[in-house]
């Protein structure tokens, strides 16, 4: 989606608790494109552009979705949380820290999508079992780690949250 | 959206239905379970809808990934009308009706008249799919699907079967230009045996063979016609055996 043809729109999106202006945007732009190219939020990654890989996962009105499959203009009035909205300032969130500690990050491209998916899982299920973790992450593809260390990272977050 | 992302389509206008709350609700009466066209599959996987329509829940659980099930809907399956749409065999086997509205009124179309071909339906310009009405039905119902793996898979063949004490209905997905009802096999088994009793193995095998013969599969990038027909035979036998409860 590089060349823009009319019609174009101006609208606001509510991302990570902030109202952001989108100006002169082609109506067919995906939420992923708008986040990355118009709103300066490149944490969500684009790979397959067809909902297979999960690297663009964001939370939209309480549901984890692939932002590449959401028409950005249809997300007006929705609450959007991206990877940039997790953690606080420069400090890593506990899910991010656990991914590092467990070695669940190699090339890192899929990591934002996984971290959002794990946050979303743990916001609904405080103590998921392995099957529930695998099911919740079945829409996120990692081609480096083989998933074992990612699974370990999620287990570690559960343990640490229970202790604190 | 995939077609836009992959540069196959550039819409000049878009009408978003995402803020119409009526499309996101479901309603249960004595006669029908009516599901709004924008209810996501995630809401059919468990809970009230899954209790009322277990075959639909089984189909919903096989759709894409959690992210896809949070966004995907029966309305989307019907609007697209891909023969591999996971919800469509359930709609067909349960004799559901598509509730269509436009500024000039509404009409209620049986699914068999709604889907007219590969990615074709009888929706007219200006019409939207409001809901899908499933007649409430006693008896057993189930759905099964074959693909190249378990997660995130588009169906190579899919099948929904319902059974009451007097009738069996079977609908096939991904093995023809439309969803196919195996009417010959349905009529044959109803005439052949008492459906309130366990079904004899030779009758079940003959039934599965007749269901397989009703498929109209093709060779394509996902599978071969011969494999698809075999898969239909296996799925029909498997679901008929499961219905012996």
Image (tube, coloured by chain):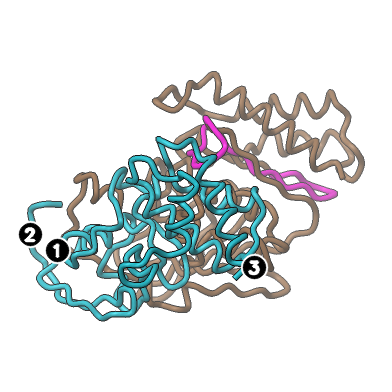
Q: Residue at x 43, y 22 (%)?
A: B219
Question: Residue A157's x, y, as percent?
Answer: 55, 59
Instruction: Return the chain for callout 3.
Output: B
Mark 3 = which residue? B33
* Left or right position of A84 against B75: left
- The mark nearer the N terminus, 2 or 1, is 2
| Discs 2, 1 touching: Cβ within 8 Å | yes
Which image quarter holds the C terminus of chain A? bottom right
> Chain A in the picture: what colour?
cyan
The answer for how far apart the CA atoms under marks 2 and 1 are is 7 Å
Q: Which residue is mark 1?
A: A26
Q: Nearer the viewer, residue B107 or B173?
A: B173
Counting from the top left corner in percent of width and height, residue B47 is at 68, 66
Placement of B202 over or under B125, stated as above or below = above
* Mark closer to the observer (1, 3): 1
Asked whether, in this view, residue A93 is left or right of residue B39, the answer is left
- Residue at the image position 47 percent from the left and 57 percent from the top: A117
Residue found at x 51% / y 69%? B36
Q: Which mark is residue A5?
A: 2
Confirm or deny contact between disc 1 and disc 3 (CB under 8 A): no
Residue B88 seen: no
């Amino acid at each position: 989606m590089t060349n823009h043809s009319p019609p174009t729109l101006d609208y606001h999106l509510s991302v990570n608790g902030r109202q952001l202006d989108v100006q002169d945007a082609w109506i067919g732009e995906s939420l992923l494109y708008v986040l990355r190219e118009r709103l300066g939020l490149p944490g969500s990654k684009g790979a397959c552009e067809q909902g297979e890989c999960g690297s663009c996962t964001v939370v939209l009105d309480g549901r984890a979705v692939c932002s590449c499959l959401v028409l950005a203009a249809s997300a007006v009035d929705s609450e959007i949380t991206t990877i940039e909205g997790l953690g606080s300032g420069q400090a890593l969130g506990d899910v991010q820290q656990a991914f590092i500690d467990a070695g669940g990050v190699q090339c890192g491209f899929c990591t934002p999508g996984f971290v959002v998916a794990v946050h979303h899982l743990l916001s609904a299920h405080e103590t998921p079992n392995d099957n529930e973790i695998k099911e919740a992450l079945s829409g996120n593809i990692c081609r480096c780690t083989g998933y074992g260390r990612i699974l370990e990272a999620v287990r570690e977050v559960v343990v640490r949250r229970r202790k604190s | 959206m995939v077609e836009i992302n992959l540069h196959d389509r550039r819409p000049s206008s878009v009408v978003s239905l995402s803020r119409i709350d009526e499309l996101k609700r479901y309603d249960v009466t004595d006669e029908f379970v009516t599901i709004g066209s924008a209810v996501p599959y995630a809401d059919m996987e468990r809970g009230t809808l899954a209790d009322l329509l277990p075959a639909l829940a089984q189909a919903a659980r096989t759709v894409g990934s959690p992210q896809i099930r949070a966004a995907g809907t029966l309305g989307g399956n019907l609007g697209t009308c891909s023969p591999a749409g996971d919800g469509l065999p359930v709609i067909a086997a349960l004799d559901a009706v598509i509730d269509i509205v436009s500024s000039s009124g509404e009409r209620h179309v049986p699914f068999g008249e709604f889907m007219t071909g590969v990615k074709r339906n009888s929706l007219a310009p200006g019409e939207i799919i409001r809901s899908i009405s499933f007649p409430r039905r006693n008896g057993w119902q189930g759905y099964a699907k074959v693909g190249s793996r378990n997660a995130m898979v588009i169906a190579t063949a899919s099948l929904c079967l319902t059974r009451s004490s007097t009738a069996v209905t079977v609908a096939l997905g991904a093995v023809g230009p439309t969803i196919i009802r195996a009417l010959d096999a349905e009529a044959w088994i109803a005439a052949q045996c008492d459906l309130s009793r366990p079904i004899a193995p030779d009758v079940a095998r003959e039934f599965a063979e007749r269901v397989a013969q009703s498929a109209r599969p093709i060779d394509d990038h996902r599978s071969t016609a011969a494999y698809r027909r075999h898969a239909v035979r296996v799925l029909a036998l498997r679901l008929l055996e499961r219905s012996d409860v």
